[in-house]
Image (cartoon, rainbow, N blue to C red):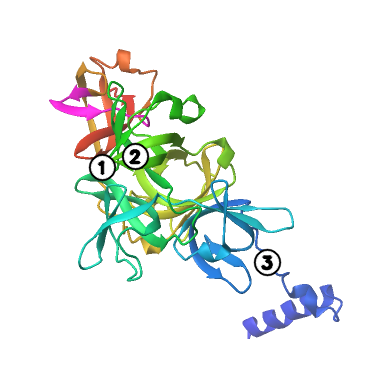
Amino acid sequence: MKNSLLAVLIGFIITGCGGGSNESASIPPPVTEVKPVVAQGSINRVDYNNNTVDVNGHAYMVERVEYGIQPLSFTMLKPNMMVEVAMMAKSGAVVSVEPTIVGSVSSIHPDCKNFMVNGVTLAFTLDPQIELGDWVMVSSLPQATADGLDYKVLSVIKIEQEDVAGQFEIEGRLSELDQNTKTFKLGTSTTVLFSPDVIEDNAVLKNGQWVEVKGHMVNNEFTATEVEVETYDDSDNDHEIEGIVTWVNSNKTEFELNARGRFVINAQTRFEDGNKNHLVSGELVEVTAINGVAKEIEFENDFGGETGTWYEFERKGIVTAVYQDHFVLGGENYYLDAYTEFDDLLTVNTLNGQYVDIEGVIIDGKYVVREIERENG
């Protein structure tokens, strides 16, 4: 009886406040989708009739498509291709195709589930129309394997456009840098030859960097004509980036995305379709950040972790020896790279003899340090 009376009173109050005639006042206004100005990720869907693509759950009307400075046909766009979509004022969006590997297919396994491009053996079931010698664009995300950081292939697209076929490109984590021979390794298998004049923006090459290399294959080696270090910086402010979490520190205040950039998590970071506990290496997420701080993290794939088994470590102890690219702690070697972060005013030069707490990830069987701080225990 009390509940019925309360319902009548509430109904009377609402009717009285609304004047009894404006029923629409209680209907919430429609929610307007706010698209990111720039979205980096894989294509979910292509609508060839309406000239639109869906990326990271947002639909964009496409003004033009390009690969580098070359225009591409809209029909080149396919689901699961990695792209960057940039909104224009009124004319639509510019879609920049961002493949991991571009080159010719040099071998195909009889079951068509493995093939090679630019010296890299990739696991993916090829379209029967793709044959030896065909030029392809491969889109992928980082994947952990027993041999190290490799490629989880999302799509392989045959290139029909003549002015694009014939170009070579490969991205990957730089390792085994040798300034004497001017070589380094990408992924687990490709050796790259370079000269200082092909490095973009006067960057200093370091092990651990994610780099994009253009050039050509000669005698099973990739000769670079352009080397560009890829990272996330202030130019990516308020951009939405899809990628794989490749490292998270133990207190979940920092994480690395796609092996090429680090973001901070603070009290204002919002989580969609999950929470901070779900943020672990190997998860597929969409990140929106401002000045290096994650504003929003959205989880994908129901936390499936479909990109291999990622191994992280944490150790404490006294550093007993320091070398150019690694140090010794507890009798084991721990390696430094471009993304190693020193806290508490520590440096390579002051590391020896210090009691430290280190965290990192295992890559190519090596313990690669991501964070070093003093331990007071």
Q: Which residue is mark 2?
A: 173
- Nearer to the camera, 80 or 19: 80
Identify the secondary structure beneath mark 2: strand
* Quarter of the image with the C terminus in it: top left
Mark 2 → mark 1, Cα distance in angstroms: 19 Å
Specify whether 139 is left or right of 111.
right
Residue 204 coordinates in the image, percent (x, y): 42, 24
In this picture, which residue range is highlighted in magenta? 327-339
Q: Quadrant of residue 338?
A: top left
**Within 10 Å of the Cα at label 2, are there few (<14), some (14-19), or many (20+) other Cα atoms?**
many
- Nearer to the camera, 129 or 174: 129
First in sequence: mark 2 or mark 3? 3
Report the disc number at residue 66: none
Identify the secondary structure beneath mark 3: loop
Contact (Cβ within 8 Å) of mark 2 with mark 1: no
Mark 2 → mark 3, Cα distance in angstroms: 41 Å
Residue 212 coordinates in the image, percent (x, y): 42, 40
Residue drawn at the location 39% of the way across and 38% of the way down: 210
